[in-house]
Image (spheres, rainbow, N blue to C red):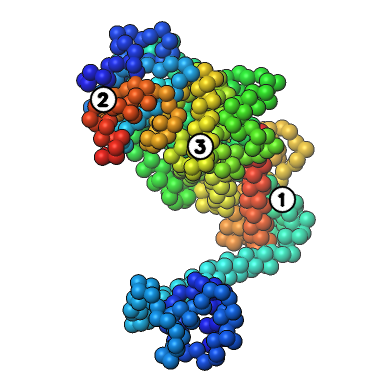
Amino acid sequence: MVEVRERVQDRPTQAAPCDVAIEGKPHAEPLSKDPIALSSKPSMFERYGKGPEADVPKPLEGTPVDVPVDFQGLEDLARASRRALVSDKMARIAIEIVAGLVVIMLAALIAKIVIDGWDKLLDWNFLTGKPEQFKEGGGIGPELFNSFYLLVLTLLVSLPLSLGGAIFLSEYAPANALTALAKTAIETLSSLPSMIVGLFGFLFLVLQMGWGFSIMSGAIALTMFNIPILVRVISQALEAVPQGQRDAALALGLTRWEATIHVLIPAAMPAIVTGVVLSAGRVFGEAAALIYTAGQSAPALDFTSLDLASPACPWNVWRPAETLAVHIWKINSEGVVPDLSAISNGTAAVLLVCVLAFNLLARVVGRALERRITAS
Amino acid sequence: MNASSSAVLGAPATSAPASALLATRDLTVSYGAKEALHPTSLSFRKGEVTAFIGPSGCGKSTLLRCLNLMNREVVGCTMGGRILYRGRDILAPDVNVYELRTSIGMVFQQPTPFRLSIAANVAFGPRHHGLAASREADLVERALRRAALWDEVKDDLKKSALALSGGQQQRLCIARALAMEPEVLLLDEPCSALDPISTFAIEETIRDIAASGVCVIIVTHNMEQAGRVSDRCAFFYLGTMVESGPTLELFNAPRTQRLSDYLTGRFG
């Protein structure tokens, strides 16, 4: 009863008559005690009746209360919506469980890697020292540098090529069979096993071209499987820019090329940065393609050397260069140092931190770039 | 061809009147083998607003996109006849379309602000055509004032244009086109994505722009809008320019049954 009165007080003149009909209890108290009765307008109870014994005017012809209420229909409806609520809740719980499992698995993996490698991760000698062949206590200094150097070189080669390819495919290429073939080829290349790329690099770059195991061979091999990913990501980003942006730029008298450079690329920049980060992550973690191209040895580096022909010069692109990922593989497959599991775990942790750091860096750079472009 | 379609918006059909800034002569547009616009001859003068009206797919936007040669960007689109701008045929192969578009501006159906600040959006065109940085602030203010947006954005010129409302974005696009000081402004259903208040603001702006001596051509679905903003009107149906003339005459005494039916809402 109280419930009914409260609802009526909320909206004294507009309360739906069926509210009373559904809640359906007779009015027990005298009308004068009803706060609503004090108002000048007739209360809902006066107008529509308050129960079987009520002595109040009948509702007017044509008012909604005359419409027979389909109680069965209302109950069915209520049951159906209860069912929908339950299934919605269950679906939500199921999704949350799955998502939670994924997060737990990933978190556990990361925690395991970081915990196992924690000692080495904070050990400056390990991070900068040179690897040992037989003794314990070797470091990963050259490997760490090589990983970054190789990544930068690979991006230097693959980014301009991919940008060019993506711009051509999305902005210039006529919609014909040749373009479709090129797109299919790129899709196929992007799922090419890295071992194949590595063996191709070994046969062609290392042997045929005579480059030997070198950073250059590694960078070109990595470029080969980096390009398809980048081209796909960049051309998708460019295609996602609304046609109106192109039209608007052209209508201002820009050429197609100017429109691409000044409007489309800035508009696609966030997606391009994401693509670069993704591909960089792959390059960082790549081992198979590098074993056969950049080699498995890491000559000690002398950072004071600027003699580009010397194997000790860090910037020499013709020296063999083992990366972190290759180091993990090599230590585990043919390492003879006594502390190999500690080194392997430490390297894995360093690799993980590097990938994370690169992602953060790329995001910061991307955001700064965007701010520069959008607020100039 | 309908007799009236060769009539030049109330002027003699023989040659472009001296006052016509822009004119089409038997202009046709085809997509592949299909002729989307049958021979059309119209003239447009400075300081006047011309509206293209007609049901969807009648060729009015197609014609509009010829006037700044945007159709050149569409694969498979060919144009025939002549488009005379200042007496010169701009369909001639030696015409520099990029230069042409600096004096024939265009605003599209959906607002198309660039991912730039408000000021950079307005200055975008002039910057690319060699505007000195020292003149930029003046030019931005002038263009925004003409588009009736200055008072709303003068304190936020460095903010992103994407933060503006739809109506403001569309006026920003008008300001961006005006910053090039065009002689002709083409508007392709500029209000179809906007609410009535923004629409009203843009219609006011259009009248002011025309009053400042620009030749304005607007495509619209909305008959009331055509009545409110335009001096002259051209009615299109199925790729044919059926009737053209001063808007009031056309609306009060349509010469063709089709326009009469369209005006009374029998189709369209």
Give the label on residue B225, or none. Answer: none
Residue A83, given in percent of the width and then of the height, sits at 41, 78
Q: Chain of mark 2?
A: B
Q: Which residue is located at x 30 percent, y 11 percent?
A: B13
Identify the element where label 1 is drawn: helix
Q: Mark 3 packing: few (<14 Cα in 10 Å), some, or many (20+)?
A: some
Q: Quadrant of residue A305?
A: top right
Provide the residue designation for mark 3.
B200
Q: Chain of mark 1?
A: A
Q: Give the number of the mark in front: 3 or 1.
A: 3
Residue A339, given in percent of the width and then of the height, sits at 69, 65
- Horizontally, residue B93 falls left or right of residue A283, namely left
Provide the residue designation for mark 2.
B255
With respect to residue A289, does A103 lie above or below? Answer: below
Q: Give the number of the mark in front: 1 or 2.
A: 2
Tell me which amino acid carries mark 3.
Phe
Q: Which residue is located at x 29 percent, y 37 percent?
A: B264
Tell me which amino acid carries mark 1.
Gly
- Horizontally, residue A54 falls left or right of residue B268, namely right
The answer to whether dots 1 and 2 both sit on one chain is no
